Amino acid sequence: MAMAAKLQGVTTHVVMPNSCPEYKKRTVLSYGANLTQCEPAAQDIAQTVRQVQHATGAIFISGAEHPDVISGHGTMGLELLRQVRNLDAVVMPVGTGGMLSGVSVIIKSIRPEIRVYGAEPEVANDAAMSLSSGERCTFSRFPQSIADGLNGNIGTVPWTYIRSNVDDIFTVSEDEIKIAMRLVWERMKLVVEPSGVVGVAAALSDSFKARAGGCKNVAVILSGGNVDLSKLSEFLQM
Amino acid sequence: MAMAAKLQGVTTHVVMPNSCPEYKKRTVLSYGANLTQCEPAAQDIAQTVRQVQHATGAIFISGAEHPDVISGHGTMGLELLRQVRNLDAVVMPVGTGGMLSGVSVIIKSIRPEIRVYGAEPEVANDAAMSLSSGERCTFSRFPQSIADGLNGNIGTVPWTYIRSNVDDIFTVSEDEIKIAMRLVWERMKLVVEPSGVVGVAAALSDSFKARAGGCKNVAVILSGGNVDLSKLSEFLQM
C-alpha cells in the first residue's frame, strides 16, 4: 500500500498494531507513508483508524475487507491457472482472510474441481473454527503466534466468500512454522516471514496427507517477506 | 554439481576446504555426494583431489578451470542478452574466475560495446591486481573475507579469458559487502551469501560511479545462496 501510494504520488496514512515487527514499520516509513501505531486489539485498531480519518480526511481502505483489495488478491489465482497445468489444490495462509477470499472466488469460478485450502497457526485458528462450525468465530484476546500476520480475526466480508468457496482449513504448530521457514530460506533461498510459510507447513503436515490425499499438484502461496533479521535466530530456535 | 550428479545417477566426490560454511557441507551431503575436506591452501586442495582420484578413479572437474563449467556460466550472459534491452554493463563477483570468464566471453563476442566488470573483496583482490598489472597474481596465504566463495585465487584458464574480455575489476570493503547483503535480504527478499552480493556492493560504490559513470542499465549477477543462518547476525554486524 505504501509503495503503491508513493508511485502514484498519493499521501498515505498507515495504522499498524505496535506488535508488528520493527522492520515492517521502518519499511512503511521508508516508502514515505505516515505511520500511526496502536494496541493490537480489533477495537483499538478501529478506533485509531477513525481518529486518523477524522484528522486527515483520508479514505479508509481495509486490507481485509475492501473489495478492490480482495479482487487484487484474486489475480494470484488467475496467474496460477495460467501458469500451472493439472493443478489439484491451492494452499495459502489465512489471517483476516482477504487473500483466501480473492483467490478462492477466482479458482472456484473458473475451475471448481481444484481444491482451495487455507492454513493458519493452531493458536490463531479462528478461520478453522469458523469453517467447521459454519459461523464466524473471533478471538477477543489477540493470539501470539510467531506468524504475526495471521493473528488478526477473519473479517466479515472475507468470511462470506470463505464459507462458500474454501474446502478445508489446516492448522499448524509453531514448530511446524519454524521448520517450514528454515526449509524455504535454506533451499528455496527466499526470505519469507513466518506468516508467509504457513501454507508450506500445512502442505507438509500429516493432516494434509490424510485430508487432502488425492492431491498431487499442489500450489502453495508464499506471502509476506517482512522479517526482522535481528530476530531470525529466535524464529528458527525450537 | 552434487545435485546434477544425483539427478543423473552418477557418484560424485566433492573436495571442499574446511573453511567452507557448515551449511554448504550439509547441503552437498544431503544431495548424496561424498565429501572430503582439506586445508584451504591451493596445494592442499590439489593434493586432496589427486588422492581422491587415485582412490576412486573419478574424473576431475575443476569448478574454476573446466571448459564445460565455464561454458555453462556463459549461458547467464546469453540469458541476460535475451532478457534485457539496452544493457550498458554487467557486474559479477570474481573468485577463481569461472563465471566471469564464461559471461565475459559471451557478452564480448555478441555485444562488445557492453562493459563487463568483476567485483571482489579488497582483502582478496588478486583479480584486480592481475588485471592492472597484466600478469596473474595469486595469494600464497588464503584471504579471510566474509565472502568466503571469493577467497580462492584466480585460475590460469579463467585468467586468459578475463585479461582480454573484462573492462575493469572493482574491490569492496567487508562493510560494503554486509550493507549490500542486508539490502538484498530486506528489500529483494532473496537469501544470497556474502560472496553473491559483492557485485551489488560494487555497483553501489563511489568508485563504480567514478569509473563506470556512463552506465545506466547495469545488470548485477547474484550468485550463491549458501548461508549458515546461525551465522547471519555475525554477517550483518558492523
Image (tube, coloured by chain):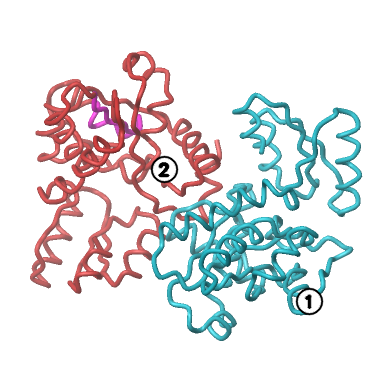
Chain colours: A red, B cyan
At x 55%, y 73%, the residue is: B115
Which residue in the structure is indicated by mark 2? A194
Q: Same chain for marks 1 and 2?
A: no
A133 vs B188, nearest the viewer = B188
User: How many C-alpha atoms fall within 10 Å of the one at disc 2: few (<14), some, or many (≥20)?
Assistant: many
In the displayed image of the protein, which residue is found farthest to the front? Answer: B109
Q: Is residue B62 shown above or below A134?
A: below
Disc number lying in front (1 or 2): 1
Q: Is residue A14 shown above or below B216?
A: above
At x 27%, y 26%, the residue is: A169
User: Which dot marks residue B60?
Assistant: none
Q: Is residue B78 left or right of residue A207?
A: right
User: How many C-alpha atoms fall within 10 Å of the one at disc 1: few (<14), some, or many (≥20)?
Assistant: few
Q: Is residue B203 left or right of residue B166?
A: left
Query: Range of the magenta residues?
Result: A115-128
In the displayed image of the protein, which residue is found farthest to the bottom? Answer: B210
Q: Magenta includes A207?
A: no
At x 35%, y 45%, the residue is: A148
At x 33%, y 32%, the residue is: A219
Q: CA distance from mark 1 to mark 2?
A: 50 Å
Q: Quadrant of residue A140?
A: top left
Image location (x, y in percent) of residue A42 = 19, 48
Q: Amino acid at mark 2?
A: Pro
